[in-house]
């Protein structure tokens, strides 16, 4: 499948959104992985995103959710049990707060490389989260194939 390039204006807006998010993400259904790529600082934004979501009482009802990033397909959703699916990162607010802590602790242990998160969050998860830690100053927009 070939992706169409974005118009120059849309490309610039998308670049800005990736940079504001702090990391690039994509979904690999073949390996069943959500891949998040960024510097340690950029990936810490993912931990904050999870912590912020879990701290909002308005997110406490089942099926509440937020979409993130320029393409909006990364979804965090309140559910009755922890899971990572092709659709969303799911769990109770306590589960999602715990995941934020897992991400933060994991990033504190590495300077670069890949971190796999599944077992520690929920062993029965359908998908894994892979944090690909890059050098400081890494531009997450550089991985978007539409730019």
Image (cartoon, helix red, strand yellow):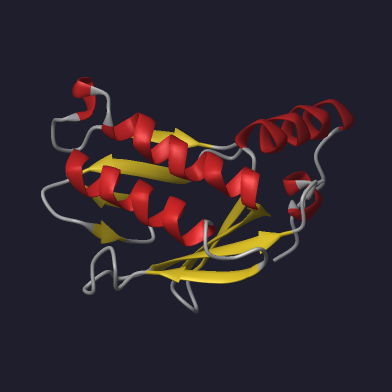
Q: Residue 35 sits in which quadrant?
A: bottom right
Which residue lies at the image location 37% right of the left edge and 47% below the top edge?
A: 100
Question: Left or right of 59: which side holds 18?
Answer: right
Number of numbered discs visible in the structure rendering: 0
Quarter containing the C terminus: top right
Q: Residue 118 sits in which quadrant?
A: bottom left
Q: Residue 36 sits in which quadrant?
A: bottom right
> Is any atom of residue 23 visible in this view?
no
Question: Left or right of 107: which side holds 118?
Answer: left
Residue sitting nearer the eye, 115 or 18:
115
Question: Left or right of 68: which side holds 134?
Answer: right
Residue sitting nearer the eye, 57 or 9:
57
Residue 81's spot in the image, x, y percent?
14, 54
The answer to whether 137 is drawn above or below residue 26 in the figure is above
Which residue lies at the image location 50% right of the left edge and 36% below the top edge?
A: 68
Which residue lies at the image location 81% right of the left edge and 35% below the top edge?
A: 11
The answer to whether 98 is drawn above or below residue 63 in the figure is below
Quarter containing the N terminus: bottom right
Residue 90's spot in the image, x, y percent?
26, 50
Residue sitting nearer the eye, 71 or 106:
106
Residue 97's spot in the image, x, y percent?
28, 43
Q: Residue furthest bottom?
A: 31
Residue sitting nearer the eye, 105 or 124:
105
Which residue lies at the image location 23% right of the left edge and 74% below the top edge?
A: 123
Q: Residue furthest right?
A: 8
> Is any atom of residue 53 visible in this view?
yes
Residue 25's spot in the image, x, y percent?
59, 53
The answer to whether 63 is drawn above or below residue 110 in the figure is above
């Amino acid at each position: 499948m070939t992706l169409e390039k974005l118009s120059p204006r849309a490309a610039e807006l998308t670049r800005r959104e990736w940079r504001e998010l702090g990391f690039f993400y994509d979904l690999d259904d073949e390996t069943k992985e959500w891949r998040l790529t960024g510097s340690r600082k950029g990936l810490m934004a993912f931990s904050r995103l999870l912590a912020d979501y879990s701290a909002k009482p308005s997110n406490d009802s089942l099926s509440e959710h937020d979409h993130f990033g320029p393409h909006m397909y990364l979804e965090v959703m309140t559910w009755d049990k922890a899971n990572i699916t092709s659709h969303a990162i799911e769990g109770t607010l306590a589960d999602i707060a715990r995941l934020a802590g897992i991400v933060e602790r994991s990033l504190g242990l590495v300077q670069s490389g890949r971190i796999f998160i599944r077992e520690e969050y929920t062993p029965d998860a359908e998908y894994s989260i892979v944090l690909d830690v890059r050098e400081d100053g890494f531009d997450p927009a550089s991985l978007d194939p539409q730019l």
